[in-house]
Amino acid sequence: MALADIAYLAYVALSVSVVSTIEYFWHGPRLPRWDLKFQLRRDIMHRIICRMVPQLTDDSTIDSLDLPKIVHDMRAKAMPPAELKPEDGVYQVIGIPVRDVPIDPREFTVDEKSNNLGEIAVIDAGTSNKLGALYEADMRGPGRTINCELVVASDIFSDKQHEAQLECRPMHAGEKLILYFHGGGYVIGSSAMYRQLIAHISRESSTRVLGVDYRLSPEHPFPAALHDAYIAYLYVLQQGFDPSCVVVAGDSAGGHLALSLTHLVQATKAPMYGGLVVLSPISDMARDSDSCVRNRRFDYLAPQPLASPLATARLFYAPGRRMSRGLISELSCPLVSPARGQFTNFPRTLVQVGASEVLADDSTQLHARMAQTKHPGSFVLESYDDMLHVFHVFFDRPESVQALGSVGRFVKDV
């Protein structure tokens, strides 16, 4: 991070803190469960995020947008890799050679089966062609590697078994593994940025966690991240982990990716994993949810409307493309908007959300769709009052402790 960026962040922190503190003591906390520290953190994060990118409402300036530069600047101002203290855990960088993971491209053929809800096919012709093209590019290219980090919490790390624990292979029959996808709106983020959160999940679940650095947009739009997630899952199985012992998890965009991967695994008839955990997930890319407006003054996120060319959905799926009915239709595909898919054969799922976050409706409506299946008890929604997007990263908050503990119990029960 450049010196100018550091100076700017210091200025923002100081100026926002003054205004926020006066508001807190004059009007009281913005929400009942907020203390001053929490409100200050929210306000500082919100100001920084709002200044990271232009705030647009339509396509009037789309032809003059320099998307690569905008995203480059966002990444330059993003959080650096998180330090992992020895008392928290250890990690090992692992590379997945994509050519070594066998994929049958026929798995990506068009799914023309419909269900009684009249939903669109999971894999449509456009997605089938894109996935097939990504596979062919991997086979023809010089050899690509998906970088990952295997994180082991200090509570379960053993000096006697450290070499085995830092290899992505089961140490005994029936060992569980969490496959984790980080957040970041599909344009920023890495497993390194989320080491502390991943280590907390590893500790609470007593389980090793493999974080995946999937490809990001706009350089690699949909379905590149999904393709990487699918390869990562097949790699885990290739290493000897039983599918029923694997839990797929993710936060925000990573939660979206975990949901989309589950739909893809269903469609390709690959072995289904034992559990799914999504924290504040994006679940519907084809609409602006009411909570984006209702909770905007509470959450630190500042999502742009779908009409904006800088909306998460459009940067993820079709960067630089103008809004149209055709684009809305494509965004409705279950691999892009997983809440619109079929959940009959989904694994046990835990959904956690902050009740005051802008994506609150994504979780509640996702769970409502899941509850329409024959086994609604397999899908659990936990909503935490007054909490924000991925509140789990506020580790000193009791809600974070409670939610991460619940994640740990869920994984242990899989």
Image: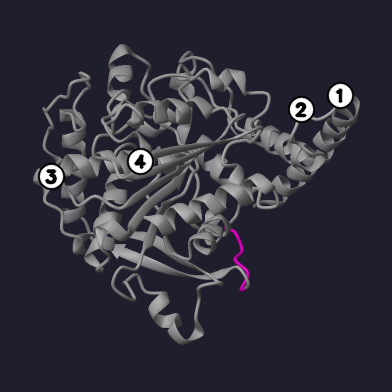
Residue 195 placement: quadrant? bottom right
Residue 27 is labelled as 1
For the residues bearing labels 4 and 2, Cβ distance under 8 angstroms? no
Q: Residue at 48% of width from left, 22% of height from top?
A: 64
Whether residue 78 is visible: no
Residue at the spot of label 3: 107
Residue at the spot of label 2: 30
Question: Percent from the top left, x then y, of residue 252?
Answer: 48, 39
Q: Which marked residue is nearer to the observer: mark 3 or mark 4?
A: 4
For the residues bearing labels 3 and 4, Cβ distance under 8 angstroms? no
Give whichever of discs 2 and 3 has the lower sequence position. Answer: 2
Which amino acid type corresponds to the residue marked 1 in the rendered image? His
Q: Give the magenta range.
A: 81-86
Q: Which marked residue is nearer to the observer: mark 2 or mark 3?
A: 2
Circle 1 — which element? helix
Q: Residue at 83% of width from left, 40% of height from top?
A: 14
Circle 4 — which element? helix
Residue at the spot of label 4: 378
